Amino acid sequence: MGSMEAILSAQIASQFFSTNKFMASPVPQMQKQSDASRRQAEKKEMNNDSAVKIAGKQRQQQLKPRSGGDRARPSPAPSAFAVRPLRRGPARRLGSVMAVSSDVLKAAPAAAAYPAVTREEALELYEDMILGRNFEDMCAQMYYRGKMFGFVHLYNGQEAVSTGFIKQLNQPDCVVSTYRDHVHALSKGVPARAVMAELFGKATGCCRGQGGSMHMFSEPHNLLGGFAFIGEGIPVATGAAFAAKYRHEVLKQSSPDGLDVTLAFFGDGTCNNGQFFECLNMAQLWKLPIIFVVENNLWAIGMSHLRSTSDPEIWKKGPAFGMPGVHVDGMDVLKVREVAKEAIDRARRGEGPTLVECETYRFRGHSLADPDELRRPDEKSHYAARDPITSLKKYIIEQNLASEAELKSIEKKIDDVVEEAVEFADASPLPPRSQLLENVFADPKGFGIGPDGKYRCEDPKFTQGTAQV
């Protein structure tokens, strides 16, 4: 250890033990310290302070800006100053960073609790949320009847997030989802019959029966897929946002509204994944038109968010990278819509990404603000009071935007749409065996098609010695 390291180590240790509550009283052996030794110790401490100040001045001179505005490249420090002095004073603030917590939103006056919406907008939101809820309820029935296979992850209770964000998008804008992707697909405009047929594994599905529940994809609707592994879709969404910026700035192909925007949906369990942090950095570095939407339901399958995360408030990670971080009540579609509109407009103007944490865990009776809610015995009644569809319905009626009969008519219409989707999916054909090896290789003749031009899988001997297809 060099002399400077020893000096600083001694000084830091001295300051720690002199202020630590467990060392507030001197040890008995030092109570009878002589005046001479005390003066000697004080003199040594003054010398240590002088050494630190000299080191700081030399370091500042090395980093002094040049006349051209560039920082001078620091020369190698002498061995005596190998340790940098501790930086004092307030850290540099980023003036453009916005951080808004849910408490800020709740503190708004009652008259401004909701943004103004027109009758048409309110009914569009209500219809989309009813579609998502009824569709997922039907999926649960069909799964238990054996019509669907594999894993099926339902979205019930989180409709306000999908509707509030996706209904603010234009057709060229992109959506990247997770394994809980059915409702995202519906909100983006994929027909219910195409989503249901995909869940049934039928050839008429949006991925011709090859994607299933966790891999919805639709090129015409710019739905870039659901992804089974957490964090897997975030780099894809970041790439789509980069492509949008390239088209706008280099190819001059964007719409008159500005940049095309990408929404990346993911859950709280993803926010400890390395890809999440890498993409936040890249998106902010290049000011990409992307919104990172965290659907925080407090559980990553069976892992509690509170047990797995050092700071459970995910929205705070945005300002750490220089982007806005917003925490919104994900059970209120109007609040979500307000935040989504601001974030999307900001991205279209080329001002960069936003991280939005949508709080959806309270529908299970959980709250970070009140840990006692983790043990609530009345979870069902607590959820019923915060059901996003019930809340929107109440608001529409109270604001005289529509009557009860009109809302019932919408519900009946959606019931018919979902029933028709089931009938369509059930009657649709299964994919042919010839489709088995399609979309596997870039060159379809590389393996799937034999020299005679026929698919190898059509050969009766194709599956000999292997599991039957």
Image: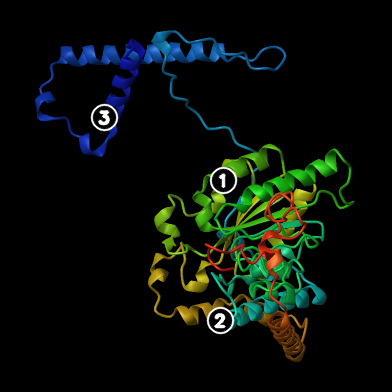
Q: Position of residue 95 (x, y in %)?
A: 66, 39
Three-letter code for the amino acid on which mark 1 is drawn: Gln
Which is in the foreground here, disc 2 or disc 1? 2
**SS class of the residue under badge 2?**
loop
Name the one closer to the observer, 195 or 354.
195
Mark 3, residue position = 18
Name the one closer to the observer, 462 or 432.
462
- Against 161, is 442 above or below? above
- Against 92, is 442 above or below? below
Q: Position of residue 344 (x, y in %)?
A: 74, 54
Mark 1, residue position = 275
Image quadrant occupied by the C terminus: bottom right
State how far apart marks 2 and 3 are (Cα): 70 Å
Three-letter code for the amino acid on which mark 3 is drawn: Ser
Three-letter code for the amino acid on which mark 2 is drawn: Gly
Earlier along the polypeptide chain: callout 1 or callout 3? Answer: 3
**SS class of the residue under badge 3?**
helix
Earlier along the polypeptide chain: callout 2 or callout 1? Answer: 2
Q: Quadrant of residue 327?
A: bottom right
Q: How many marks?
A: 3
Mark 2, residue position = 146
Query: Can residue 20 be seen in the rendering of this structure?
Result: yes
Bin the neighbour count of mark 3 within 10 Å (Cα to Cα): few under 14, some 14-19, many 20 and up: some
